[in-house]
Image (tube, rainbow, N blue to C red):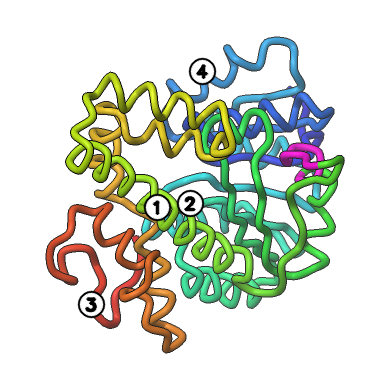
Amino acid sequence: MKTQSYEIGMVGLGVMGRNLLLNMADHGHSVAGYDTDASKVAALRQEAENRDIHGAESLSEFVGLLRVPRAVMMLVPAGAPTDAVIRDLLPCMARGDLIIDGGNSHFSDTDLRAKTLAKREIQFLGVGVSGGEHGARQGPSIMPGGPREAYARVRPVFEAIAAQVEGEPCVTWLGPRSAGHYVKMVHNGIEYGLMRLIAETYDLMKRGLSLTDDELAETYDRWNREELNSYRNHLRDLSPRGRKDRQAAGRCDPGRSQTKGHRHVGVAGRDGLAGTSAHDRCGGGDAKSVGLQRGTRSR
């Protein structure tokens, strides 16, 4: 085991976390990973093959693998799990280290965490990551916010793994504090608005034009090969399997955060397309059932 030799570490080795590490390693970066679930560490080791990746069995081993000052990225559920990881990391971290939250945290939580960690002289980045499991492996869109100097430390890694459009990486520093997570929140809201519009085409063709499922499938397949091909993942979401996935997703939906974010800054978000889309995606119902009452936060 090579101590203090790995460039960046990842806590949270679900498919997204493992795919990001594999992406980093494919671009020449040495990486380490840790998860409390030993089966996920084993999965990382199996997928690593000959890449410069180390799966740690304990948090202390994981931290000991990283170069000083350390850079640790988290990909865990927003809210209490994120706070728990930070709490567990702190005894192992030192002045000048960097913690990166790559989850769908509410921007106000990111501001609070950054302020708390700054008192211990630990840097904190709130980073939106878009593209799902495939994007994490092949190239996501990355939305970092926080201290510019902290972003400069991981900029080479993020630019290497990000999606490329016309030779430019889909990542840039977006601003201080929670700018990255705020942009990701708006991104999610826009995405769900587009999903709502596409879903309405399904309703019009299914109920209005009485198209069969086979005819609908043929229509969307054709759209995927024409000018709407950039929305292919959303069009797939209209399949019977996609409807089941949406029901599961509604139980923990980052799209809700945009409506709450609008309320936080005094903008009425529920009446807009993004707000109603998040509401409908979660199954409708009254505002309380989807966490839209005043004063609530995303979790």
The residue under the point 36% across, 35% down is 237
Q: Does dot 2 land on a helix, a strand or a loop?
A: helix
Q: Quadrant of residue 193?
A: bottom left
Q: Earlier in the sequence, mark 3 or mark 4?
A: 4
The residue under the point 77% across, 58% down is 172
Label 1 crowding class (10 Å Cα cut-off): few <14, some 14-19, many 20+? few
> Which x, y percent locates residue 110?
53, 69
Determine if the magenta segment contains residue 41: no
State the residue position of label 1: 81
CA gap, disc 2 and disc 4? 21 Å
CA gap, disc 1 and disc 4? 21 Å
State the residue position of label 4: 43
- Name the residue type under label 4: Ala
Q: Does dot 3 land on a helix, a strand or a loop?
A: loop
- Name the residue type under label 2: Val
Q: Nearer the viewer, mark 2 or mark 4?
A: 4
State the residue position of label 2: 85
> Which x, y percent locates residue 15?
49, 29
The residue under the point 52% across, 24% down is 41
Q: Please say if the residues under marks 3 and 1 sit with CB atoms less than 8 Å apart.
A: no
Q: Nearer the viewer, mark 3 or mark 2?
A: 3
